[in-house]
Amino acid sequence: MPAIPPSDCDPLYRDGRHYDGLNDRFQDDLPFYRDLAVAAGGPVLELACGTGRLTIPLAQAGIDITGLDRSAGMLAHARAKAREAAVKVAWVRADARRFRLGRRFRLIFIPFNSLHHLHDRPSLEAFFACVRRHLAPGGRFLVDVFNPSLQVLTRPEGQVYPVGGYPDPDGQGSVEITETNVYDRATQVNRIKWRFAFSDGRPDVVDELNMRVFFPQELDALLVYNGFRLLEKWGGFDRQPFTSASAKQLVLCAAAPRRRTTGR
């Protein structure tokens, strides 16, 4: 297999407190994942778990869940939050393209658009192979990504757009995030730059958020060709069917039977 390139998103996820400041308000996906986890009836693996935004509430609901992420900073914050909530979670620091946990899971999911950080075929193939190795017989795998917006991908280069804001976790005023982006049609990577502006006058910080775009038919084909059988495809966390107007692609899969090879 070709070499797997290094991740280019690590700087963006160095501080879990800033991540939570921006993202803690997103809660609409939690009931969806809780229902999937309960229906799975067994151990659950969350890939790219970050600070435990979903992991910890699922553990509080009595679900046996393991959270895996490559960022030491995000996991440190997740562990602190889990201790404060008095819940037990198995946290694993690992690359989602290269992990061996020694157990299988009834549900594996990668939420909140994290698959977009895998930009190339070797990375995707390695990731899907890891998922298959860790999926229990009869288990389910859920992918959660955007439905690409041509309006976003064709934005004028250099145009600044608001992302959001939050109180500074160190109590130093507030933080506002804006972005610019350029879509690379050859690689299907939307090259985004986030600018963090601090109200107390500290210098701005600029981080890259490069996201591979998965068009709907491409995503389905990637899953099938990497050994999965598509069970459902929803356009949102209300489980409405996927359509061209859907904001999300939520694909529920099972491992496809391995093909037998015959010799002569």
Image: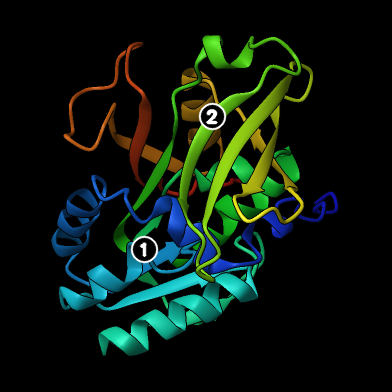
* Residue at 53% in and 67% down: 16
How many numbered marks are there?
A: 2
Residue 172 picture quarter: bottom right
Residue 236 visible here: yes
Q: Nearer the viewer, mark 2 or mark 1?
A: 2
Q: Secondary structure at mark 2?
A: strand
Left or right, 112 with reference to 59: right
Left or right, 232 with reference to 186: left
Residue 260 visible here: no
Q: Residues within 10 Å of mark 2 (few under 14, many from 20)?
A: few
Q: Which mark is residue 162?
A: 2
Amino acid type at circle 2 is Pro
Quadrant where the C terminus is found in the figure: top right
Q: Nearer the viewer, residue 206 or 33?
A: 206
Residue hosting label 1: 53
Q: Secondary structure at mark 1?
A: loop
Instruction: Measuring from the top left, give residue 138's x and y in whole percent.
Output: 27, 58
Amino acid type at circle 1 is Arg
Left or right, 260 with reference to 62: right
Tell me if residue 99 comes above or below residue 12 in the rendering: below
Q: Residue furthest front?
A: 200
Instruction: Measuring from the top left, give residue 176's x and y in whole percent.
Output: 55, 43
Which label's residue is closer to the chain start, 2 or 1?
1
Marks 2 and 1, how far apart at CA: 23 Å
* Residue at 21% in and 75% down: 63
